[in-house]
Image (tube, rainbow, N blue to C red):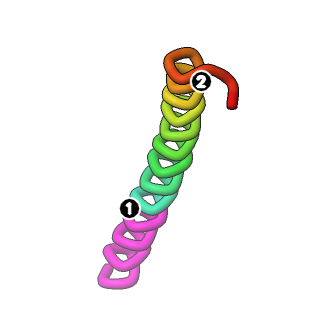
Amino acid sequence: MPFFVFVCLAVIACSFLIMLAVQIIRMEKALIEISEITESMVKKFYGNT
């Protein structure tokens, strides 16, 4: 019985870590998009220098 509980906890921890990694990857992609948008806006405002 304690082994079964340990396995359940391990599965929950692994799934949590995978979800966390996916969220970090999504946030990174969103940040890259935002930085590209702001860069293009800055180029529009200040001209291509």
In reply to whether residue 2 is colored magenta, the answer given is: yes
Q: Residue at x 49, y 31 (%)?
A: 34
Disc 2 target residue:
43
Which segment is the magenta one?
1-14
The image shows residue 24, relative to residue 36, as above or below, that is below
| Amino acid type at image mark 2 | Lys
Quarter of the image with the C terminus in it: top right
- Residue 8 image point, x, y percent: 38, 67
The image shows residue 11, relative to residue 42, as above or below, that is below
Q: Residue at x 51, y 56 (%)?
A: 21
Would you say 29 lies left or right of 27 here?
A: right
Disc 1 target residue:
12
Q: CA distance from mark 1 to mark 2?
A: 47 Å
- Residue 15 image point, x, y percent: 46, 56
Residue 25: assigned label: none
The image shows residue 29, relative to residue 43, as above or below, that is below
Q: Residue at x 56, y 31 (%)?
A: 39
